[in-house]
Structures are given as structure tokens and as C-alpha cells.
Image (cartoon, rainbow, N blue to C red):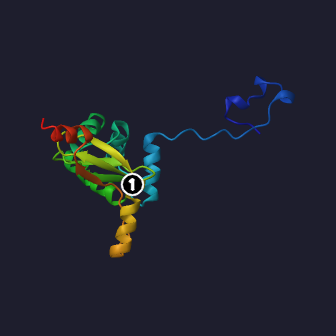
Amino acid sequence: MPTDDPADDPGDAPVASAPEPRESPAPPLTLHEGYTERLRRLGVRVTPQRLFVLEAMEQIGGHMTADEIMQWAARRYPALNLATVYRTLDLLVSVGLVAQTDLGAGAVHYELVGDSPHHHLACERCGYVIEMDEALLADLRARALEVHGFHAQPRHLAIFGLCRACYDAAQTGS
């Protein structure tokens, strides 16, 4: 049976020594293809604006403000405006693809949600942010259930205080 694939041309190799055909692995998804699929699974309409916001968040990584996302995405999609970025972020937060956190710097920060929740310790003095493992909240969740009958499910939490350096500086009076 004829094919359009030049690799299947019988003139390229003797028939007797041709290896058995194997399924080749699917090509890796581009960022947009991966996000398109995720949005569709969540029942969310796929738009260029949503894809560019998600791509910006993946490329920049970590915590970012809507302004930072806007600056990155607008270079690739000039028709994008800040109001659209905020609406897109609100939608992505509501469907669980993005987490929104106030890290105490006067602006809300956004981050792509990973496979497991993580939390933050934010220094009120210098602004240093430490990622904290979800396991550290196990006792808090157990206590909330025991005392209040509340099933806590923190997804992206910031706890404010002083980092070690700022605490030590405060203790020594500097």
C-alpha cells in the first residue's frame, strides 16, 4: 500500500532487512498545546489571551504580579491589555490552574499551581520569601479538624514574620 512518508519508500532499504515498524512516540506538546488541552478538560474556552498569560507564567516562573505578566505577554501579543490579564488571572484562579497570594509587597502575586500545594514564609522586614513544604501544616490541619470540625485544605498560604537574619538583627539592636 503506498504511503506519503518518504521513510517508507522501498528503495531506501532492502525489504528483507527492514526492521518491523514500531509506533513512534508522540511529539512533545508545545506550551500552547498543553495548556489548550488543560483548559478544554476544565471546560474553559481557549483564547489567545489565556494562552499567552499561561505561557508568560511558565516562562517567567515563580511568583509574579499582573503587571509583570502583562509586560512579558504584551511583547508577544500587543493587543493584550491589563484588564484582560486581570480577568484571565481571576478565571485561572477560579479553575485552579493559578494560585493568588499576597506576599506582603503591596501587590498580589500569582503562580502556576504545581502538582502539590506549597506555602510561603514571608519576611515583613526585608521581603524575603521562603517556600514551605505542605507537610509542615499537617498538625495545623489535624488541630483544625479536632477543635473546630473544620477540614482545612490550604492551597497557597503565606505566613508573615521575620526571617532569621532580620530576627537576629532585631535581637542585637541593629
Q: Residue furthest bottom?
A: 149
Quadrant housing the N terminus: top right
Q: Is residue 144 above or below residue 59?
A: below
Quadrant housing the C terminus: top left
Instruction: Give residue 116's position: percent from left, percent from top.
Output: 44, 52
Q: Is residue 45 visible?
A: no
Q: Residue furthest front?
A: 172
- Residue type beneath disc 1: Leu
Residue 10 vs residue 52, the one in the foreground: 52
Q: Is residue 159 above or below residue 19?
A: below
In the rendered image, which residue does mark 1 sit on?
136
Q: Is residue 100 left or right of residue 8?
A: left
**Residue name at image x 25 percent, y 46 percent:** 122
Instruction: Give residue 60's position: percent from left, percent from top.
Output: 33, 37
Q: Is residue 71 visible?
A: yes
Residue 107 vs residue 47, the one in the foreground: 107
**Residue name at image x 63 percent, y 40 percent:** 25
Q: Is residue 8 left or right of residue 103?
A: right
Residue 149 vs residue 173, the one in the foreground: 173
Instruction: Give residue 141's position: percent from left, percent from top.
Output: 38, 65
Q: Is residue 78 above or below residue 158?
A: above
Quarter of the image for residue 13 reads: top right
Q: Is residue 19 left or right of residue 144?
A: right
Instruction: Give residue 39's position: percent from left, percent from top.
Output: 42, 54
Quarter of the image for residue 70 reads: top left
Q: How many residues crowd mark 1 within 10 Å: few (<14), some (14–19), many (20+)? A: few
